[in-house]
Image: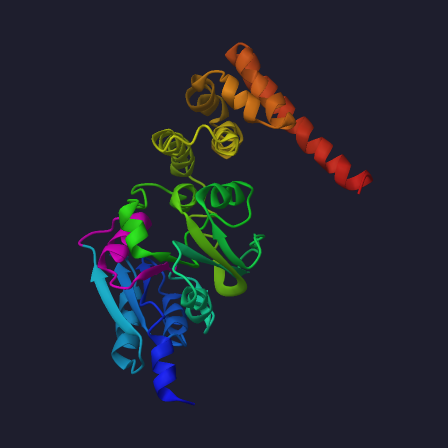
Amino acid sequence: MDTNKASAKSLLLPAVSIVVPVYGVEKYVGRCFDSVAAQTYPNLECVFVDDRGPDASMDVLRERIAAYRGNVRFRVVRHERNRGLSAARNTGADAATGEYVYFLDSDDLLTPDCVALLAEPLRERRVDFVLGNYASGGDRSCFIPVKAADGFIRGNAEIRARYLRGEWFMMAWNRLVKREFLVRENLRFAEGLLHEDNLWSFQLACVAESMCVVRAPTYVYTIRGNSIMTAKSRKNLDSLVRIADEMDAFARERTLFGDADVVRFVASWREGLTFNARPYGASWETYRSAVRSRGFSRKTFAALGAAGKLRYLHHLLPAPLGFVYVLAVAKAIVVAAFLKRRFFR
């Protein structure tokens, strides 16, 4: 191999910073570290953010960092107190020095060629973000595959439309995001919020002008029984309500409500709050305060599909009847979908 040519080629590769928040993951963080240490990518730093957890997670990390002799540049940034996942990601992104930032959860794993595969398209052109596929494992199986085809996607209208159609997942991990783009668009994770990935990914899709899809699995997602994704608490519900409000505000600020897909997506999220509240016994309260209080909108009604229009008619009824109507229509739609799958496949 011509080493001069190899070196020149590697200059086209961007520096990448992996950001890993650490809290209560003593059982998992060692293997997470090992998966970063095994990366084949040549220009890589990893920023662990100590969010002051109660266990020995940071002891595990310190031992591994001290023993490591490879090319990955490991750093630790420490919070003075526990501030949560969103704050830890923001802190890590602020500390990152790479041209691209990659968010990794500390109970998950990277494939050895993860960063190399995601960075390869950047030899051709720089984009706002590169998205990879993933595999899942853990207590329960959950897999939402990337439906978009391999390759570049240009223009915000196309990127936004594909996201709103569900062509890729809402989680913030497993994508290289240009750091300058994050700063320019002020894309921060909302602190004090659960399910913050849903809001952040929506905002990302609404402002990105270029992206690339790599459909190869580059990430292993671990679902734990006590994780934020599976835990049930009133804070979950409050966060879902806040996300609906933040999506609405962001779309209005960016003048996106001329896009019927955005209107439909935000409306569907809000309309779904009634059902998300059921595990907490707060369906009526949530319906009255977070759904019904918005009133009937002709623009929203026009943007919805047939099933959405049918549900949305509850706004025209007195609130107590509207609530009963919403639950009845939802049940009818579920039954109809089951019958369709069962008898008309």
Protein image colouring: rainbow
Residue lying farthest to the top in this orientation: 318
Q: Is residue 88 magenta?
A: yes
The image quadrant of residue 107 is bottom left
Residue toward you, 345 or 280: 345
Q: Is residue 118 above or below residue 283?
A: below
The residue depicted at 56 percent of the width and 17 percent of the height is 314
Residue 114 placed where, x, y %? 45, 68
Residue 262 placed where, x, y %? 48, 33
Residue 230 placed where, x, y %? 48, 48
Report the span colored magenta: 80-104
Q: Quadrant of the C terminus?
A: top right
Left or right of 61? Residue 289 is right
The image quadrant of residue 95 is bottom left
Q: Is residue 92 above or below residue 30?
A: above
The residue depicted at 41 percent of the width and 62 percent of the height is 125
Q: Is residue 313 magenta?
A: no
Number of labelled discs?
Answer: 0
Residue lying farthest to the bottom in this orientation: 1
